[in-house]
Amino acid sequence: MSTPHRVVQHVARVLLGAFLVLAGVAHVVAREEFRAQVPSWFPIDEDVTVLASGAVELVLGLAVLLAPAARRALVGLLVATLFVLVFPGNVAQYVEGIDAFGLDTDRARLVRLLFQPLLVLWALWCCGAWPRAARPGPGHDT
């Protein structure tokens, strides 16, 4: 039987997976918006960056949705890593004042930056990668 915690965690994981799949597809559909988010200093062509990051989001989204329970923590770590890797691009969007996806003010871009750590925690928690250390091992009372 599922506990309320497990149900909420499952729903959060499905939402994360769906979010990543939709974001991956959006990289192709709304490519111009995503190109605007690639920092000017990034050494790879904007279009290649957008398509590659979209493919990564699509694959990770599907992994979040379809990975067996034994692999979910690893998937959560990979998704969290993706969120960390794209953070410099979000900082560049703020610093350079680039408008994209309705983020047309410094305040909106700053709020987005503040939510990035929450995305990392969401990926780790809903995929079971965190807090793994807090779980008791076999033979311990729970």
Image (spheres, grey):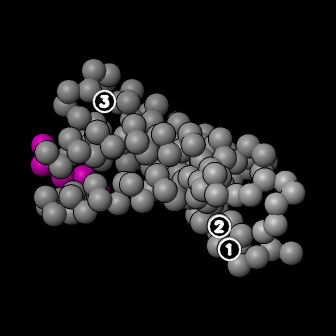
Is 99 within the magenta? yes
Q: Quadrant of residue 102?
A: bottom left
**Mark 1 and mark 2 residues within 8 Å of each other at the beta carbon:** yes
Please provide percent x and percent y for residue 26.
45, 49
Mark 1, secondary structure of its residue: helix
Q: Is residue 46 above or below residue 103?
A: above
The residues bearing labels 2 and 3 have C-alpha atoms spaced at a distance of: 35 Å
In the image, 51 versus 11, the foreground residue is 11
Task: Give how far across and how far down residue 29 sits, in percent.
Answer: 43, 47
Say whether marks 2 and 3 touch (CB < 8 Å): no
Residue to which mark 3 is pinned: 46
Q: Main secondary structure of the magenta part?
A: loop
- Mark 1 vs mark 3, CA separation in Å: 41 Å
Look at the image and tell me whether residue 23 can be seen. Answer: yes
Residue 118 coordinates in the image, percent (x, y): 42, 59
Q: Which circle's residue, 2 or 3, is located before the other in the chain?
A: 2
Residue type (three-letter) at the residue carrying disc 2: Gln
Specify the amino acid type for callout 3.
Glu
- Mark 1 and mark 3 residues within 8 Å of each other at the beta carbon: no
Q: Outermost residue toward the bottom?
A: 4
Which residue position is annotated with label 1? 5
Q: Quadrant of residue 112?
A: bottom left
Q: Secondary structure at mark 3?
A: helix
Residue indicated by mark 2:
9
Q: Which residues are magenta?
A: 96-101
